[in-house]
Image: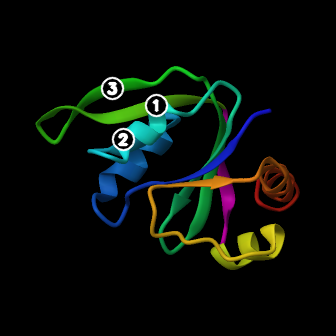
Amino acid sequence: MPKTYIINTNKSNCPTDESDMLHNKKCAAYFSPWKYYIDEIEANDIIFLYSSGRGIIARGIATGIPETKDYRGEIDEEHYMELDRFQILSTPLEASEITKIVQHRLQYNQTVISLAHKFGIQVWQFITKNCI
C-alpha cells in the first residue's frame, strides 16, 4: 500500500528551495540526516509539499526514483524525487484544516511527516474538492 508524506519546502532556511520544487515538480531534502528520507520514498507514494506559514501548496505522486545533486556548493547534498500528477494548489490547505481532516495535530517543524494512508487519501480528496 502506498505511503503518504508531507514534505516541508525549506522556505524558512532558503526561499529559493520552494520555488525550485514547484518549478521542477519534485520533492527534496538537504543535508544529513534529512536528505536520506527522500531515498525511502517509493513509487506511487502520495506527496504533499508544505510551505511554512501557508500550508500544503502542491501535491503529486512519487516516481520512486531518488536522485542527488550538488547543493550550495556541497556535493550530493540535495536528494530529490520527481513527482507525477503534480499540481500546485490554487488555495493552500492550511494547517488548521489539515488538523480537522486527520483529527490530530501534526508537528510541522520537521522536514518529512509520515501520515497514515487513510489520512493521506482524505487530504487528497479534500484538496481535489476545495483547493484545485
Across and down, in percent, residue 91 comes to 69, 64
The CA distance from mark 3 to mark 2 is: 9 Å
Q: Could you say whether the residue bearing mark 3 is in a helix, strand or loop?
A: strand
Q: Do the residues bearing badges 2 and 1 touch, measured as CB atoms within 8 Å?
A: yes
Identity, as a three-letter code, of the amino acid under mark 1: Asp
Q: Residue at x 31, y 52 (%)?
A: 16
Please state, as top left, top right, bottom left or bottom right, where the N terminus lies in the image. top right
Q: Residue at x 28, y 62 (%)?
A: 13
Q: Nearer the viewer, mark 3 or mark 2?
A: 2
Across and down, in percent, residue 42 comes to 61, 28
Instruction: Please indicate whether residue 56 sits to the left or right of residue 53 in the image.
Output: right
Instruction: Please indicate whether residue 100 sits to the left or right of residue 23 in the image.
Output: right
Q: Do the residues bearing badges 3 and 1 touch, measured as CB atoms within 8 Å?
A: no
Per the picture, the main secondary structure of the magenta-coloured stretch is strand
Label drawn at residue 68? 3
Q: Could you say whether the residue bearing mark 1 is in a helix, strand or loop?
A: helix
Q: Which residue is mark 1?
A: 39
Q: Which residue is mark 2?
A: 35
Magenta segment boundaries in residue numbering = 85-94
Q: Do the residues bearing badges 3 and 2 touch, measured as CB atoms within 8 Å?
A: yes
Q: Residues within 10 Å of mark 1 (few under 14, many from 20)?
A: some
Identity, as a three-letter code, of the amino acid under mark 3: Thr
Across and down, in percent, residue 117 comes to 79, 47
Sequence-wise first label, 3 or 1: 1
Identity, as a three-letter code, of the amino acid under mark 2: Lys
Sequence-wise first label, 3 or 2: 2
